[in-house]
Amino acid sequence: MSWVVLHFIGIISYAASGAFVALEAEYSFIGVYALGLTTAFGGALVRNLIIGVPVSELWDHTIILTVLVTLTFIVLLPLKWINHWKRWSLFFDSIGLASFALQGAMSAKEVFSDDLGVMILASMFTGVGGGMIRDIIAARKPLALKEEIHAILTILCAFCIWLGWSTPIQLTLIILVVIALRMSAIRYQWRLHLPCHLKKGDQ
């Protein structure tokens, strides 16, 4: 499966995740479109502001059409499909996390060459920014702030781009590694046990 296909799966997954969060919150169809579009484009919007690229460059007709078709399809789905989505949401969301983080790092590299710090920031905000905005609008605690794995994986993506990984095979490999690591972290509840996580009774 090529990088382009995986990236479009990531776009569809992020748009769908926003839509299903809106449905869970019992928002109207306007809320479905709002959260879906926010999740799909929110992170990239913040990234472009960080690296100084015009926001207007986000408006790719193919991507916009893909997102709108996805959201329209979800609006017309029976509510029982929400349960089916939950079973696969983390898997597809992981594809979105990886593809968006890679896109952010590559965009930063085009502007700032080999500035690893900017690439990490762009990768992180593109990968988790849309989901964080989505969760805040839906009055939920942002998942990316509760689990370290999101930030760690976006840093991994940025580091790989900084090393010069750019071929479709290399980008696809990175996505597969991110999916495996994130699903494993969720399955085995991997956490960084830092002093700030200790409760008073544990000290």
Image: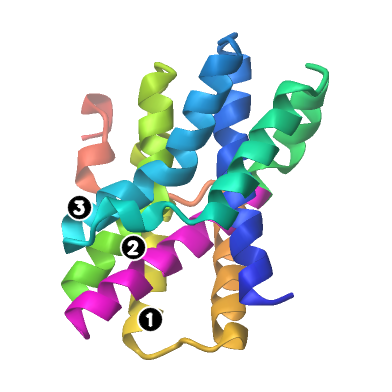
Label disc, if present, on residue 123 of the rendered structure: 2
Tell whether label 2 touches label 1 (CB within 8 Å): yes
Q: Residue type at mark 3? A: Leu
Label disc, if present, on residue 82 of the rendered structure: none
Classify residue 12 as left or right of residue 118: right
Q: Is residue 148 visible?
A: no
- SS for dot 2: helix
Q: Nearer the viewer, mark 2 or mark 3?
A: 3
- For the image, the number of numbered tags is 3
Judging by the rendered image, the residue that carries numbered circle 1 is: 161
- SS for dot 1: helix
* Colour scheme: rainbow
Q: Quadrant of residue 138?
A: top left
Query: Which of the two discs, 3 and 1, labels the residue nearer the N terminus?
Result: 3
Image point (49%, 52%), residue name? 190
Q: Nearer the viewer, residue 159 or 41?
A: 41
- Does 181 appear above or below 156? above
Classify residue 83 as left or right of residue 42: right
Image point (31%, 84%), residue name? 162
Q: Nearer the viewer, mark 3 or mark 1?
A: 3
Judging by the rendered image, the residue that carries numbered circle 3 is: 49
Q: Quadrant of residue 95?
A: bottom right
Residue 106, magenta (yes or no):
yes
Please give the range of residues in magenta: 92-115
Instruction: Provide residue 2's location: percent of width, then percent of height.
Output: 68, 77
Q: Nearer the viewer, residue 189 or 52?
A: 52
In which quadrant of the rendered image does the C terminus lie? top left
Tell whether label 3 touches label 2 (CB within 8 Å): no
Image point (40%, 81%), residue name? 160
Q: Residue type at mark 2? A: Ser
